[in-house]
């Protein structure tokens, strides 16, 4: 019992293969897929995208483009990411640990779109756009906020692959932050995490995007908080407004890793801290 | 001396059981109960499955007696039809097949039919005994220590006179050993003999269990330890179960069969540390001197008796702590529940009761307004004092040395309030503990075991150490080589510590209880010394072997009936300091610094000893803050490495390890046990430190962030 296997040499070849075998497993770093390998039936075939050149690398023009096949290690060491996309570098540094970061990719985190995918609130906070491609329809772009539609459910069509994510850099007066609270300090699944992108005029919030993970069936933007803080100066008042707005905006759950109460408390504290 | 097994392990040349293969080997898989309590009514085989390519074994295929011989014979190797199912993941049937995949598919096609019965998951329900799981009262074992009083009335009279009584109930959670190599075993029948090789701590435990189970004589069961990736107690009793399974399958399949547990199966089905509830009363006079100690400890033994009485015994014997006290009453009980059996884990009952008494001493310090370390120093046992069982401490008592060592490096306590890198408010605190750990087997155990070890010069002129003590990563091979080399006066390169195989080595007793270096190492030293004397007159080219048997040091007697006397040949002594920071946004407590000063008698190999202490300390810190077995209806709900959390290096604080050497006159070069002691104390030190940081008591572990969050109303 062993699956068919293809390792395409170009994106065009990969898209053809995907069109031909929409049911095959698309493998990037394998760090999500291998965890459950023994618990699920073998796939009919494997389409291996690991190190496919067109999917790899980070480029900075007026936007930051990260190829789907770029590893977290490559992301976290890229100069432009370090300089202007602090939350993304921070999230990358907290995904698993070194071994996982050397293997796990952005495309994999996005492909799985689990509620605990650590890069996803960052993508939401930066209002990132995904670039998808198929042999039949070519390329299209979709904001990440529309991409994930439910528990590990996405808008990716059966014949599509994720090509890249595009992020606009923040203007100078922008506070961007990120915080992860996991079960331990490395190799840990988030109990709560979140990112914020806060545009300021002086100290006053002109626009904010706040996103949380692990508090719903998918990573989510918290519009109530975003509205509540707009027009307020950073500090105790904004923090309290954010906290109060969050309270009725999320319904976290109990599971083996944590409790709903804890998640709610900590989510409130994190969001308040973002604006204090 | 560097680790002899180190290079092979680091370079991947060491061959663990999964790397070993016998010709034509098949793979086994286990069909387990999904029900916590019930009666097995039938085992159905899916008619749609092709059974011609696999072998299925049930209790009916056990050639001898269907039980795992240990202390009692209450645990079956496989539940027989008509008999009770006692816990989730209990083994009901076995399958073997030429490939793992086929074996797993076959196991899924075996359908046990179990009629459910009410199940018991708490010690209160167990003690209420509405549902009888064991005997009439569900109590596997009870121990009682009485010192300085004749009756409960006498005892209460002392308590009544106290100026103050500190009282509390303490909970410690089950803990997974998480050895790096899962349980693994292979069996093969050749010429009527059953050869079993696998990952284990105690080849002679497996040997003892296989004789009745397979209906074979001692010679016809040969047990060999393969390179073993950690045990921590988890490979003390469970390997007998796995050995039974591969032996039964191999017999039925007529070929070698091996089973290597998947991590999830290992976490779900094998033993964990006993969860324990310890009620503790500490009665003191006006000055704060201890008048009486009262302890009542109840442990959850799980579904079968296994090693629970011995674990309880050690818990009870440590429960009063290393403090002077004229009147002591300790009651310990271990009860039956429908959890998978709890079992041996580094520390073996002592960490549970240590947590309780060191929380109590902390509360006493707070009550008296006395410095917590100075209070401990004032109350501590010293040479000439007697323990709870009336053992007079005659030698090797490192109390003053370990406390002084911590005092020297302690420095000022951390600043209580601060701010973290994200602007989050922080609270910091410091905790101390002082504790001891009995080295070697409990009570009269060492004399009863009468362990033996052999040192020989072989016909080739090299030297062999033959013992059943296993190297499970703790360095036994290296230590034995060092001891033999020194005693024989020959270079270490001429010495071979042979792989433990029951047909080639004497029974040195199990590899447990911090006894390998101290007790078996002592035998190796004595045997080597005698061999050295014999050699000049021995004819060249012939094997000369000397075997030594354990004899208790003079004056070491223990009375099992009254629980009085010398509970251990000697004790290790330890003092620990922990500094923590609590993040008030996330409620996470982090250990910033942990100092352990431990009296080990003599560190024969200081690097190995420090490694033991650092590893044990981290295991204890993990137990205190992170590790949590979540049982749901008797099933481990977090049976995978993703959710069964143990600390990583990123969670490890600065560990400062200070070796103190107050020699044990009857150990090799003065050495005494070190394997377990570092596990006992740090959890209470963490609880004391978190309490110091937040100004409120934490009497249960793990102190998860969720627990700290829920305690908010009590912070000061
Ligand atoms: C020990 C360990 C720790 C971990 N810790 C974290 C953590 O802290 N935080 C976290 O967020 N995650 C963590 N993960 C999960 C995982 O590492 C990340 O989600 C990682 O980004 C996945 O990337 P990958 O390339 O390995 O994905 P893969 O496993 O190869 O793929 C994941 C999914 O994405 C799909 N996919 C991948 N690339 C494409 C593409 N180009 N087009 C279409 N579909 C695609 C695959 O088909 C699959 O469904 C951990 C995993 C492990 C094993």
Image: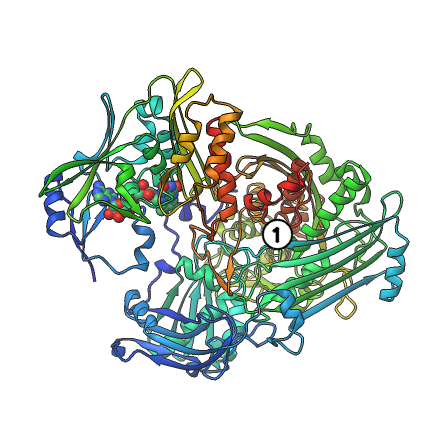
Residue B131: image location, x then y, percent: 60, 75
Residue B605 shows in this picture? no
User: To which quarter of the image does residue A206 belong?
Assistant: top left
**In this rendering, is residue B236 above or below B622?**
below
User: To which quarter of the image does residue B512 belong?
Assistant: bottom right
Residue A60 shows in this picture? yes
Closer to the camera in the image, A101 or B314: A101
Asked which secondary structure carries label 1, the reply is loop
**In this rendering, is residue B240 above or below A101?**
below
Residue B388: image location, x then y, percent: 79, 57
**In this rendering, is residue A140 above or below B269?**
above
User: To which quarter of the image does residue A86 belong?
Assistant: top left
Q: In the rendered view, does B106 fall on the left or right side of B564?
A: left
Q: In the rendered view, does B161 fall on the left or right side of B228?
A: right
Closer to the camera in the image, A196 or B210: A196
Closer to the camera in the image, B10 or A8: A8
Q: Residue at x 37, y 67 (%)?
A: B258
| View quadrant of ligand 1 | top left
Q: In the rendered view, does A91 fall on the left or right side of A106?
A: right
Host chain of mark 1: B
Q: Which residue is mark 1?
A: B676
Circle 1 crowding by C-alpha within 10 Å: few under 14, some 14–19, many from 20: many
Closer to the camera in the image, B348 or B225: B348
Classify the position of the C terminus of chain B by image quarter. Answer: top right
Residue B503: image location, x then y, percent: 49, 70
Residue A34: image location, x then y, percent: 30, 51
């Amino acid at each position: 019992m062993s699956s068919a296997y293809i390792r395409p040499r170009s994106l065009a070849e990969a898209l053809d293969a995907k069109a031909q075998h929409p049911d095959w497993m698309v493998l990037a770093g394998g760090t999500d897929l291998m965890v459950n390998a023994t618990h699920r039936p073998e796939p009919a075939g494997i389409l291996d995208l690991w190190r496919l050149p067109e999917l790899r690398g980070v480029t900075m023009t007026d936007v930051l483009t990260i190829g789907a096949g770029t590893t977290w290690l490559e992301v976290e060491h890229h100069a432009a990411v370090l300089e202007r996309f602090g939350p993304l570098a921070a999230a990358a540094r907290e995904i698993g640990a070194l071994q996982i970061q050397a293997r796990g990719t952005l495309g994999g985190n996005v492909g799985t779109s689990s509620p605990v995918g650590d890069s996803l609130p960052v993508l939401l906070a930066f209002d990132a756009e995904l670039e998808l491609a198929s042999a039949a329809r070519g390329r299209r772009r979709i904001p990440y906020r529309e991409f994930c539609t439910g528990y590990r459910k996405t808008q990716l069509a059966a014949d599509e692959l994720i090509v890249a994510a595009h992020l606009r850099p923040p203007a100078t007066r922008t506070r961007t932050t990120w915080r992860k609270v996991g079960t331990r300090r490395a190799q840990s699944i988030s109990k709560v995490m979140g990112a914020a992108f806060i545009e300021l005029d002086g100290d006053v919030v002109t626009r904010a995007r706040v996103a949380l993970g692990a508090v719903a069936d998918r990573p989510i933007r918290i519009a109530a908080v975003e509205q509540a803080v707009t027009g307020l100066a950073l500090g105790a008042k904004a923090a309290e407004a954010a906290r109060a707005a969050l309270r009725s905006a999320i319904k976290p759950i109990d599971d083996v890793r944590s409790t709903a109460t804890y998640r709610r408390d900590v989510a409130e504290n994190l969001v308040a801290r973002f604006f204090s | 001396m560097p680790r002899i097994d180190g290079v092979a392990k680091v370079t991947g040349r060491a061959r663990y059981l999964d790397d070993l293969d016998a010709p034509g080997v098949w793979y086994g898989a286990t069909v387990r109960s999904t029900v916590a309590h019930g009666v097995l009514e039938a085992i159905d085989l899916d008619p749609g499955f092709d059974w011609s390519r696999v072998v299925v074994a049930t209790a009916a295929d056990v050639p001898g007696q269907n039980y795992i011989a240990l202390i009692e014979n209450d645990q079956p190797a496989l539940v027989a039809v008509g008999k009770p199912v006692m816990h989730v993941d209990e083994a009901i049937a076995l399958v073997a097949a030429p490939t793992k995949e086929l074996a797993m598919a076959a196991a899924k096609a075996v359908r046990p039919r179990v009629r459910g019965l009410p199940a018991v998951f708490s010690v209160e329900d167990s003690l209420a005994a509405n549902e009888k799981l064991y005997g009439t009262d569900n109590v596997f074992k009870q121990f009682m220590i009485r010192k300085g009083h004749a009756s409960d009335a006498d005892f209460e009279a002392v308590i009544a006179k106290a100026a103050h009584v500190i009282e509390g109930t303490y909970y410690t959670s089950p803990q997974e050993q998480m050895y790096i190599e899962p349980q693994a075993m292979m069996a093969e029948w050749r010429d009527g003999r059953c050869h079993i090789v696998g990952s284990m701590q105690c080849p002679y435990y497996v040997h003892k269990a296989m004789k009745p189970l397979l209906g074979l004589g001692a010679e016809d069961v040969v047990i060999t330890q393969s390179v073993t990736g950690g045990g921590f107690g988890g490979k003390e009793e469970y390997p007998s179960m796995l050995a039974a399974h591969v032996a039964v399958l191999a017999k039925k399949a007529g070929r070698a069969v091996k089973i290597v547990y998947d991590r999830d199966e290992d976490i779900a089905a094998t033993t964990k540390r006993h969860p324990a509830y310890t009620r503790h009363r500490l009665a003191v006079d006006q000055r704060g001197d201890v008048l009486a100690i009262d302890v009542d400890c109840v442990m959850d033994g799980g579904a079968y008796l296994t090693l629970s009485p011995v674990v309880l015994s050690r818990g009870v014997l440590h429960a009063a702590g290393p403090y002077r006290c004229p009147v002591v009453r300790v009651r310990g009980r271990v009860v039956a529940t429908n959890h998978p059996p709890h079992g041996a884990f580094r520390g073996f009952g002592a960490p549970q009761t240590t947590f309780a008494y060191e929380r109590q001493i902390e509360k006493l310090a707070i009550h008296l307004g006395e410095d917590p370390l100075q209070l401990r120093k004032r109350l501590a046992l010293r040479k000439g004092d007697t323990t709870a069982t009336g053992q007079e401490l005659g030698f090797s008592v490192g109390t003053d040395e370990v406390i002084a060592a911590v005092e020297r490096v302690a420095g000022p306590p951390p600043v209580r309030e601060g701010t973290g890198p994200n602007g989050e408010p922080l609270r910091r605190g410091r905790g101390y503990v002082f504790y001891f750990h009995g080295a070697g087997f409990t009570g009269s155990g060492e004399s009863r075991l009468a362990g033996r070890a052999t040192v020989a010069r072989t016909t080739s002129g090299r030297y062999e150490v033959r013992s059943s003590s296993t190297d499970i990563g703790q360095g036994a091979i290296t230590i034995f080589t060092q001891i033999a080399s020194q005693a024989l006066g020959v270079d270490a390169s001429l010495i071979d510590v042979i792989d433990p195989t029951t047909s080639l080595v004497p029974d040195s007793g199990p590899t447990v209880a911090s006894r390998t270096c101290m007790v078996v190492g002592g035998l190796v030293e004595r045997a080597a010394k005698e061999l050295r004397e014999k050699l000049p007159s021995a004819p060249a080219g012939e094997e000369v072997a000397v075997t030594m048997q354990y004899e208790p040091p003079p004056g070491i007697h223990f009375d099992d009936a009254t629980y009085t006397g010398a509970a251990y040949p000697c004790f290790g002594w330890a003092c620990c300091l922990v500094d923590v920071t609590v993040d008030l946004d996330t409620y996470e407590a982090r250990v910033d610094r942990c100092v352990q000063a431990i009296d080990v008698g003599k560190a024969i190999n200081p690097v190995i000893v420090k490694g033991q202490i650092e590893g044990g300390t981290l295991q204890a810190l993990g137990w205190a803050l992170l590790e949590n077995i979540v049982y749901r209806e008797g099933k481990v709900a977090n049976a995978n490495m993703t959710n069964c959390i143990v600390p990583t290096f990123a969670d490890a604080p600065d560990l400062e390890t200070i070796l103190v050497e107050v020699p044990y006159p009857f150990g090799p070069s003065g050495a005494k046990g070190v394997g377990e002691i570092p596990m006992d104390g740090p959890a209470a030190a963490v609880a004391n430190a978190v309490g110091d940081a937040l100004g409120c008591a934490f009497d249960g572990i793990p102190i998860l962030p969720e627990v700290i969050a829920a305690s908010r109303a009590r912070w000061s």
